Amino acid sequence: MKYKEFIAELHDIGKLVDKQTLKQEGIEISGHTFHQLDFSQIGISQPSSPSWYAQFTEEIGSLASTKISQDHLPNVILTSIADELASTISRTYGGSRAFRERKKRGDFVSEGIHVLWNPEFYEKEKDKGRKWAAFSTLRQLKEMFKFIDDCKNQKEFFVKFKDNLTLTSEEKSTPFNIVSLFTHLQLTGKIYRISRNHSQTVKENGRLYLKYLNKRIQTVNEAAGGRIEKPKQKGKWIYRLIFCNITFPQSLCRLQDLNIFGKRADLIKAFSEDENSRDYVLFFTDDFMCLFIPKEDEIKIRELLKQFLESGFIIDYKEMEAELNLLTSSMERAYKEFHSSSTTRHLRIYEKRESVKPPSEIPPHLCDSCQMKHGKERLKDDIHEYLCDTCYGIREMGDSASEYAEWEGKAAWMKITLDQERLLEVLRRLFGEYVDSYTLMQSVGSNDKAELKKLFKPLAVQMDFVKDYNLLLKAFNSRIYEVKNDEGNPFFTKETFRYPIDSYYEFGIFKVRSGDAILRVLDLFNNLLDEYFPECLEDSPIKLSLSVATVKYPSQEHWQFLSTPEEAINIQSPGSTNLSLNITRYKLLREKIKKEDIKLSHFLHRLANIEIETESSLFVILEIFNNRKKFSTLLELTQNGLLVQQILDFYKLTREVTIL
Amino acid sequence: MNKSKKIFLHFELKAEALAIGERTKGGTFRPCIETIPTSTLKGSFRSHFGLANVLSIGFFREETYMKDTFIYAPFDTFLGTAKLPISLQYLKPANDKEMIMGDIYVVKNRATDSLIKVTPTEISLGALKSKGFGRCKLRYIGEIKPDLKIGYLKGRLLEEELNAFGITKVFKSCYGYLFYPTSEIDGVYKRALFERSIIEGPEILIKKEYKYDH
């Protein structure tokens, strides 16, 4: 018989079954697992592949179980650990007994996923004809069991049921229905394979154990331990959740140095796709990876990320090392809570850095670019430079921005960034609002609501968010060339809006012939945020930065500004303006400030001068008030918290005739 | 490492314009740093007071300075032509301030005690002194014995000087290099700890406390 792989992800395939519709066909199914199903009822025999035993995940919690053959027990227990972990590190749990009973009765069941940052998502997808359920008829149900028998690997499962898995929530009750089954199963599968690859099955005195770093366990609880509020329920298995920022020491003083971004993106992609490392990566962006890995005794970060280090990258990381059930991506919060109670359980947080340790002394010359190695003299176009082999190699990767160097006039460097720290805050706010205000939650008591909010863990939601972020980047990349000018022709072409690094959609450069170019880019970003993240406009963790200057302006300077965005929209024109706005204020400005209003421009300049001279906003407000009939919009803008300087900067940056 | 507290001589620094350069080359833009590395002060104390190997470090007070750019064209005396213009970043007083203010901490020993007697005085620091940058007034404030804390390093100092500055442990090393003169015309680059390293050391060297495990 051909060897078949155990696919942990299939343990929840039953969540794609529409039990209500099947009931109308006379087929009664309870729960979402089928280990107790009477197969004669549907006229087929029970599947026999190893993956079939994943159906016992919720039934079996110990290696001492006799419900299935010992051959399958380790896989089932590891799936169970992974499933529990994937759920508990990803949403909330708890609530009073009464609340839990109501939940069990189905009082809070809601169809489809609730995407926190895009609550209309499910309804919109439904309108497009997409369905959460993959199995609604007897024929489809039979096909599901055949699939459990025949499925070759998790990829086949994800490809075949992508739409259904994306629309189905991992847990159907409000407010737990915020994680897609797709992401939950991705997470479960990764954790299962990591724990399988780093544990051994051992038999001692006829008893079966799983051993990881010499800690043997028989039950799920023994391995994972209790939740954070259980100070005595210690778990034996300790793992790490790591947030890695992948940075570089190069100073980007030549345009060819931009190749470093391509190199980094390629390495991250390769690491996330390589079969030996992909399971460790829970999610990633072009400069960030979230890893789930065993303790340092089992896997050394330095060895795992060797390729990055050898290529000259620096890994700055925050690491949470904890019992499985204590792991969470909201590390700081958990750390405070953990240390507020007396417990001997294991939860540690470290901030560390990995880089190739440089030599204690370097004789002149130091590499001009990275400043971390000895630089050899290189001569190009009559310019002498001292570069180490790594930095020279980066320059030699190609002239990705050579066309840009030929441009004349002004250009804007654009960077879109996902701020992971802010994302965690935003997710917590969105979840809090969901718990407090969603219709089905109205009858839930305030204590239960408070507990649900307190115990929220955002990891899987973060993963879903990053997926949508990548969709936004792709959409930006394609739609920028669909933006029309007043004559209905494309405003930007591949020549006037460039992505210097292939497939690195966070970073672009475009020609600025007038303020209109800036407005078109800002509008597109704003529209996409509205489309993908309508609930995050006030405090968007996705930020757009534009640095507008002459083509010869130093790239280092551009980059310094682009890499430290404050708000959702950040624009600098060196020596002239520096503006940071959230989307709500941008929209307000966009609506109220008309570019052709010269009188307003003069008045704004006057106000800005008053503000500088008096160093007081009081005089400015007074002046606006005195001119409220003439410039009524200004009063409205300042009442909405905008500073006069911000209004003026916005006007200067976006008016038709460039005055940058 | 020795955990006893170090004694430092605290000086106040005032300047109108300063350009202490990041050691970045190869471009026409020269960024500046916002602290005063040990190597910069060592050179300055040697040339002004004849004191070799003074161990000191400096920090500018936030809110007293801002960055600006100065463009100049260096002159090639050999060819008699101007080179490509260079944009040099420098620090100047913040909008509402008259001077940039800073603090310099000198490790106390018999040699450095003599500095107390020569201040108030003037020293120069950083680049473009011929164009008026870097003139600083130095005034002695007093002797301090700061407590030890764990946190993020706020300056730049040579690794071999850690002990002398009272740094007892390094938990996270952010490396860079500082120039170390070996003669009047020669020198080497020595490994140094840069900002964001996590250390246990005198609190004057700590920008922000580190709150996690180490």
Image (cartoon, coloured by chain):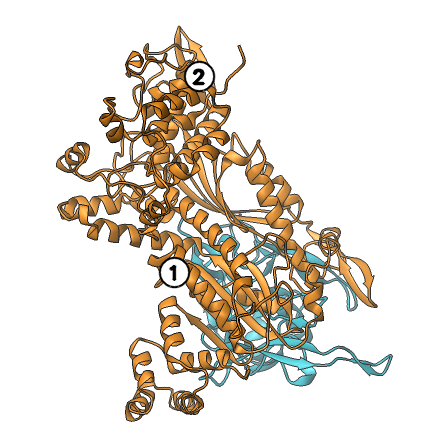
Chain colours: A orange, B cyan
Q: What x and y, as percent, mark residue A409?
A: 65, 77
How busy is the neighbourhood of tag 2: few (under 14 within 10 Å), some, or many (20 plus)? some
Left or right: A358, with A602 as reference point? right
In this view, which residue lies farthest toward the right?
Answer: B79
Left or right: A427, with A75 as reference point? left
Answer above or below: position of B64 versus A491: below
Q: What x and y, as percent, mark residue B184?
A: 77, 69
Label 1 chain ID: A
Q: Quadrant of residue A304?
A: top right
Tell me the distance, in whole angstroms, between the alpha carbons under discs 1 and 2. 45 Å
Answer above or below: position of B153 versus A314: below
Q: What x and y, as percent, mark residue A328?
A: 37, 41
Q: Amino acid at mark 1?
A: Asp
Q: Earlier in the sequence, mark 1 or mark 2?
A: 2
Label 2 chain ID: A
Q: Quadrant of residue A277?
A: top right
Residue highlighted by disc 2: A50
**Residue A530 disc label:** 1
Closest to the observer, A134 or A149: A134
Q: Which one is closest to the eye, mark 1 or mark 2? A: 1
Q: What x and y, as percent, mark residue A432?
A: 26, 51
Q: How many marks?
A: 2
The reply to whether the C-beta atoms of the residues labelled 1 and 2 are less than 8 Å apart is no
**Residue A258 disc label:** none
In this view, which residue lies farthest toward the top?
Answer: A206
Q: Amino acid at mark 2?
A: Pro
* Residue B25 shows in this picture: yes
